[in-house]
């Protein structure tokens, strides 16, 4: 049976972190590493976990760098990157799915499970296309190899492959109060370009409890950040898509008065072309 390490980058401010840690300790499937990259005082009592959780404390790290440091401390076959504000949707089914995954002879380089938002939260209709900004993403209900990119918060990588590709690019992802994106997509694209397969695992679903409402200004800021991150990713590892997207976006914006171009798409396109 393969081994696994749970890696949780955190500011140790999330009220959801303790329930997640308590659950992982209770089922004890693998090692648990929490990386504290906070500038503030913690809200959880670190002493409660010092014998069962490895806590790395470096408050100057960006999220990608923090995840990579967690990977370097791990010794397992797989690295399970979890956000500190999630919890399994159905804990018994999640545990069984993970156990089956670790019991399989096949090696998977990248594995993912669906991410749900709490039932009490509704994403505004206009923003549904960008539901992943809220931490929600669904793909399938059955095990499946795919070339569709996975998103953050609930992702597993084979450790040896993750380290062979130097982990997440540290120029992407969050840095302190500055939001960043696409570090997971960057790594997945590198894997796909080298003929690796991405794998969706059913019943690894989690709920993203940290979801919050965005003002129009915050939402547009995220759109622009997404456009910039897409450009930087394409420029570094996919020049063909850079040319294709540049042409597509230029044509779409030029004819936007005559075609039904989504208002929010146009903002992202302009941000992409501006860089």
Image: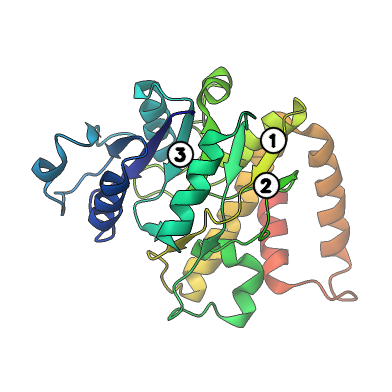
The answer to whether one can see residue 275 in this image is: no
Q: Residues within 10 Å of mark 3 (few under 14, many from 20)?
A: many
Mark 2 — residue? Answer: 149
Q: What residue do we see at 32% from left, 46% from top?
A: 27
Report the Cα–Cα distance between label 1 and label 3: 19 Å
Mark 1 or mark 3: which comes first in sequence?
Answer: 3
Q: How is the image coloured?
A: rainbow
- Label 3: which secondary element: strand
Point 73% across, 50% down: residue: 273
**Tag of residue 80:** 3
Q: Give coordinates of residue 158: x percent, y percent.
A: 55, 29
* Residue 239 drawn above or below residue 72: below
Q: Residues within 10 Å of mark 2 (few under 14, many from 20)?
A: some
Comparing 272 with 175, the one in front is 175
- Dot 2: element: loop
Residue 227's tag is none
Q: Earlier in the sequence, mark 2 or mark 3?
A: 3
């Amino acid at each position: 049976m393969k081994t696994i390490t749970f890696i949780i980058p955190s500011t140790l401010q999330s009220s959801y972190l303790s329930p997640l840690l308590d659950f992982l300790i209770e089922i004890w499937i693998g090692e648990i590493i929490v990386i504290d990259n906070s500038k503030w005082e913690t809200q959880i009592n670190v002493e409660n976990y010092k014998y069962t959780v490895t806590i790395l404390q470096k408050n100057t790290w960006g999220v990608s760098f923090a995840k990579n440091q967690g990977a370097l401390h791990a010794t397992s076959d797989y690295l399970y990157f979890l956000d500190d504000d999630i919890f399994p949707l159905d804990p018994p089914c999640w545990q069984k799915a993970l156990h089956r995954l670790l019991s399989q002879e096949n090696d998977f380089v990248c594995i993912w499970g669906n991410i749900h938002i709490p039932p009490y939260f509704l994403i505004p209709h206009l923003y549904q296309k960008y539901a992943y900004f809220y931490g929600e993403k669904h793909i399938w209900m059955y095990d499946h190899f795919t070339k569709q990119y996975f998103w953050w918060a609930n992702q597993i990588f084979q450790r040896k492959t993750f380290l062979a590709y130097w982990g997440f690019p540290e120029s992407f992802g969050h840095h302190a109060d500055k939001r960043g994106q696409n570090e997971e997509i960057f790594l997945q694209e590198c894997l796909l370009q080298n003929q690796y397969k991405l794998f969706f695992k059913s019943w690894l679903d989690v709920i993203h409890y940290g979801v919050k409402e965005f003002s129009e200004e915050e939402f547009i800021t995220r759109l622009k950040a997404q456009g910039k991150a897409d450009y930087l990713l394409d420029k570094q590892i996919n020049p063909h898509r850079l040319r294709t997207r540049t042409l597509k976006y230029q044509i779409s914006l030029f004819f936007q008065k005559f075609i039904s171009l989504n208002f929010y798409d146009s903002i992202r396109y302009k941000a992409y072309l501006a860089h």
